[in-house]
Amino acid sequence: MSGLPASVKIKEVGPRDGLQAEAAILSTEDKLRLIGCLAGAGLREIEASSFVSPRAIPALADAAEVFANLDRRPGAVYSAVVPNEKGARRAVEAEADEIQVFLAASEGYNRSNVRMSVEESLEQAARVAKVAREADVPFVAVLSVAFGCPYEGAVAPERVLDLCGRLKELGAREITLGDTTGMAYPTQVRGLSRAYGERYPDVPLRLHFHNTRGMGLANVLAALEAGVDRFDASVGGLGGSPYAPGATGNICTEDLVHMLHEMGVETGVDLEALIGCARLLEEFLGHELPGKVMKAGICGHLTAAP
């Protein structure tokens, strides 16, 4: 297809964003096997864990152990999500390759998620950015519910762009806009992506979609048409927000890779190996994952006629 990026960078968020929504808590060993499988499939950006309170998210209580025992592949970036300055210092000690800070575009979701106003979260983000800068660790920012809030409804694009400007001022090397509860739709995605690119051409944009209402890959296509070439995805389609009931999984990594490859867009990912990772995760969790390609197979793999 003409006009699309020649290649796309995919950040795998399953080991953090995916597992945090699961009732079952994987062992550290199983998490390391999953991360190793994903890196082996060619994913070069992996959200490995989060340095958050174990009381808040017990599934990620072993973040330090995960980072301490990673089999780090050359060229791979293992990132950590942090909620505050304390988490940032723990991430630095663990030698995370990148520190991510989250805040919401709406007051309602931000207070539900971290019990702070958006302004207070920006102050916290400034302290996280300072820790990262002093340690010479890349600092990136994620703005959740950027396409709609489950508590407040529509979020004004101008508010989203203004908050992106605040994050840029803090030194964010990349900004992710999150469709945390799957409220985004293609024309909205295309418009906001283009507006971001016009206002902040020097800060790369990444998009994080959920497939809650079945529009995840359609939103990716709209973003591609607007020039976006960085996306989050979760192996097997695992995930959901523990702070937003009904918010089902992230877009599925292998489904995303399959679509991109069919359109001639490079990802650097071995799709067959990635499907193997999704099946491994199903084995660990003991239940079926929502991914489609792992069930239907790759389009180019033809079957014998009956």
Image (spheres, grey):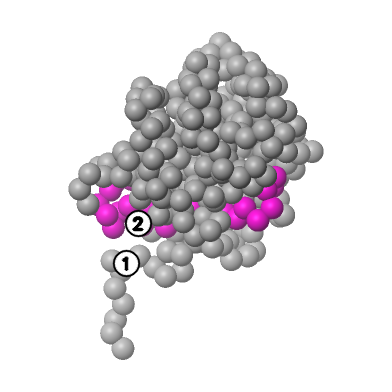
Q: Is residue 247 left or right of residue 263?
A: right
Q: Residue 16's quadrant in the figure? A: top right
Q: Mark 2 — residue?
A: 259
Is 150 one of the magenta-colored residues? no
Q: Residue 195's quadrant in the figure? A: top left
Horizontal and vertical percent for residue 243?
A: 70, 45
Is 246 one of the magenta-colored residues? yes
The quarter of the picture where the C terminus appears is bottom left
The residue nearer to you, when weighing 112 against 300, is 112
Residue 301's place in the image compared with 133, above or below, is below
Secondary structure at numbered mark 2: helix
Q: Residue at x 58, y 33 (%)?
A: 105
Please identify the residue farthest to the bottom as the structure is shown: 306
The residue carrying pointer 1 sits among few (fewer than 14), some (14 to 19) or many (20 or more) residues within 10 Å by Cα, namely: few
Horizontal and vertical percent for residue 17?
A: 59, 44
The segment highlighted magenta reads 241-268
Mark 2 and mark 1: span between their CA atoms? Answer: 10 Å
Secondary structure at numbered mark 1: loop
Q: Is there any visible trace of residue 3 in the rendered image?
A: yes
- At label 2, the amino acid type is Met
Q: Mark 1 — residue?
A: 299
The residue carrying pointer 2 sits among few (fewer than 14), some (14 to 19) or many (20 or more) residues within 10 Å by Cα, namely: some
Q: Main secondary structure of the magenta part?
A: loop
